[in-house]
Amino acid sequence: MGNNVQQKEALALSSILKADLFSNLLPMERHLVANYTGTMLLRKGGILFSRGKKAECFYLLLEGQIRVYKTREDEGEDEIARFTSGDIIGDFDFSRGAGGAEYDANAVALEDSSLVMFPGLGFTLESIAKEAPHVVSKILLSCTAMVTGRIKSTRKLIVESMSWVQDLHRKLHEDPGTGLWKRSFIDEDMKQFLEDPMALILLKPDRFKVLVDGLGHSAGDKAMIQIATLLKNITRRLGKGWALRLKSNETGLLINKCDASQAEALALSLSSSLAKLAPIPMENGADDFTFSGSVVWGIWPQDNSSWDSFFEGCYNLLLNTWKAGGNSVVRYKKEQSS
């Protein structure tokens, strides 16, 4: 009976040698490592490790179940993982500091659990190094390889998921009603895409309040979709640029590598296309709503070397043009912003 217990314990101790950290050890070195390995029994609800504690060892779960989680400021919990029989726990935390890093999460036993740990109780890497420095050197080398490999895997995942990341980024800045880029894109991300010359063309439809007051917001939403289609058709035709919705009914275009002559032609074309949209019948005998708009265009950095000042100048000119009656195409110049 005693021999069976010893054999079972020896098998448990040797099982942790399958961990990646020991992959480059010779058979005799693995046998030596087993001497510095220990077992432990963790009762249900017992804490295996907690956030901030030094990661001085890692574990192989033989039986039971371990839950790893993080606590939030509101005292709630976010589960990270659950480990079952045969899983290695904490090897990466151990590798990050070769026994000196801190755990950034908590681990608790969901049921009575038995584990193998390295180093075992009473041992540290430093104490083992005094007796077997060549073995510890190989383990530390594996630690470095594990951390490097995890970094490479993360980078590979990012590269492979780039289209997904881009799609997520697009949804973050996409106006749900029209599919146009929102003002947040201008404020947060646009500067990294600036290319000299960059054309900004802004559009605000005239008398839009008449349409909404007469037929309701749904009519205004439908009209905005038509305007958005005009803008997106331009960027599709050019194969570049961004169609924007700044707020409410104020929209526009950002076209990279676009000089003044091309920008002016695009602004005039946009104004003309807007006027060609089919009139919308109104109720109570009122005249049909016809489309026209105030259009302002400018070129960065020629018209203003400061992007923020340039954008705000164009926007203010758009509002002033609209208030003055609209139905015109105007170029922004820096002196107009003063």
Image (spheres, helix red, strand yellow):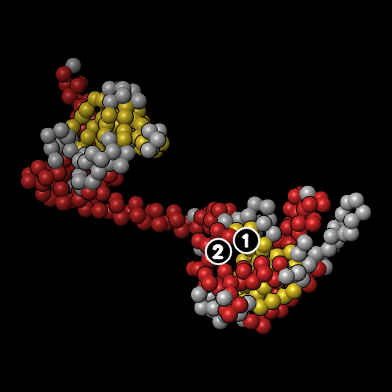
Q: Foreground residue, 5 or 144?
A: 144
The x and y percentages for residue 123 are 13, 37
107 vs 154: above or below: above
- Circle 1 sits in a helix, a strand or a loop, which is it? strand
Q: Which residue is mark 1?
A: 246
Could you say which quadrant of the image residue 32 lies in? Answer: top left
263 vs 17: above or below: below
Could you say which quadrant of the image residue 158 lies in? Answer: bottom left
Question: Dots 1 and 2: beta carbons under 8 Å?
Answer: yes
Residue 163: which numbered mark, if any? none
The x and y percentages for residue 219 are 78, 52
The x and y percentages for residue 134 are 12, 50
Q: Earlier in the sequence, mark 1 or mark 2?
A: 2
Q: Foreground residue, 338 or 250?
A: 338
Q: Which residue is mark 2?
A: 186
Q: Foreground residue, 23 or 1?
A: 23
Q: Residue at x 27, y 53 (%)?
A: 145
Q: Residue at x 55, y 61 (%)?
A: 185
Is residue 197 in sight in this rendering? no
At label 2, the amino acid type is Ile
Q: Residue at x 9, y 42 (%)?
A: 127
